[in-house]
């Protein structure tokens, strides 16, 4: 079975992380569960590796690497940072942490759709986004759009 490792780097202060990292982690957990249901029958497993960072490494926090490749190298994502009240509370001083700009929208967490797209890109799997179609007819990874690999394939 092929394995894709997604490294999630996030601030950890006595077992707590900032709100942004927490939200990214929730998005990541949900997407990995969903994508494993789709890919495991095809012999692909996705794992999450947590990398806990201290206050001196906060500039690396809220980042994802796919088999060592940062998400911003896989997708058209811009990385920035701004003041983070949650990090500041955890660290005890004014702190900025990462934000991402994806599809012309700025996010404080890494959105699920970016995680999903990056997984497909890292695996070299076809990804078709059918905007405007009902959820039940979206195809997320099937080359011909009719195979039920994800449970979201096109229905005829």
Image (cartoon, rainbow, N blue to C red):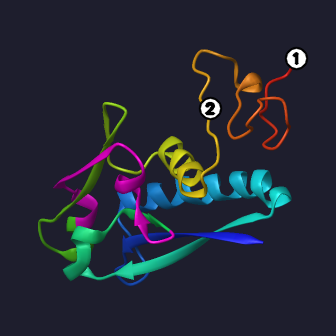
Q: Mark 2 points at which residue?
A: 128
Assess whether mark 2 and mark 1 are in contact (beta carbons under 8 angstroms). no
* Residue drawn 74% across the image and 58% down it: 36
Q: Is mark 2 on a helix, strand or loop?
A: loop
Q: Which mark is residue 156?
A: 1
Q: What element carries label 1?
A: loop
The picture places residue 119, in percent across and down from the top left corner, at: 57, 54
The picture places residue 55, in percent across and down from the top left corner, at: 23, 79
Q: Please tell me in which quadrant of the rendered image residue 44 appears.
A: bottom right
Query: From mark 1 to mark 2, how far is it between C-alphas?
Result: 17 Å
The residue nearer to you, when weighing 71 against 22, is 71
Q: Please tell me in which quadrant of the rendered image residue 18 appears.
A: bottom left
User: Split into 4 quadrants, where in the image is the C terminus?
Assistant: top right
The magenta segment: 67-87
Residue 15: within the magenta? no
The picture places residue 111, in percent across and down from the top left corner, at: 46, 45
Residue 72: within the magenta? yes
Q: Which mark is residue 52?
A: none
The answer to whether 35 appears left or right of 120 in the picture is right
Q: In this view, does 131 lie above or below 102?
A: above
Q: Is residue 39 above or below residue 132?
A: below
* Residue drawn 79% across the image and 31% down it: 153
* Residue drawn 38% across the image and 51% down it: 109
User: Split into 4 quadrants, where in the image is the N terminus?
Assistant: bottom right
Q: Earlier in the sequence, mark 1 or mark 2?
A: 2
The answer to whether 43 appears left or right of 131 in the picture is right
Which residue is at the far left?
94
The picture places residue 114, in percent across and down from the top left corner, at: 48, 45
């Amino acid at each position: 079975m092929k394995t894709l490792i997604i490294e999630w780097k996030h601030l950890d202060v006595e077992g707590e992380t900032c709100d942004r990292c927490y939200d990214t982690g929730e998005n990541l957990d949900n997407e990995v569960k969903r994508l494993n249901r789709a890919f495991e029958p095809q012999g692909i497993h996705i794992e999450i590796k947590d990398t806990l960072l201290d206050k001196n490494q906060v500039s690396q926090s809220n980042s994802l690497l796919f088999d060592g490749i940062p998400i911003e190298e896989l997708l058209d994502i811009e990385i920035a940072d701004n003041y983070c009240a949650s990090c500041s509370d955890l660290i005890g001083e004014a702190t900025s942490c990462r934000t991402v700009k994806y599809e012309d929208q700025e996010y404080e967490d890494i959105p699920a759709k970016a995680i999903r797209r990056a997984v497909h890109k890292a695996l070299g799997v076809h990804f078709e986004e059918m905007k405007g179609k009902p959820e039940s007819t979206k195809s997320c990874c099937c080359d011909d759009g009719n195979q039920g690999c994800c449970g979201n394939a096109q229905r005829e």
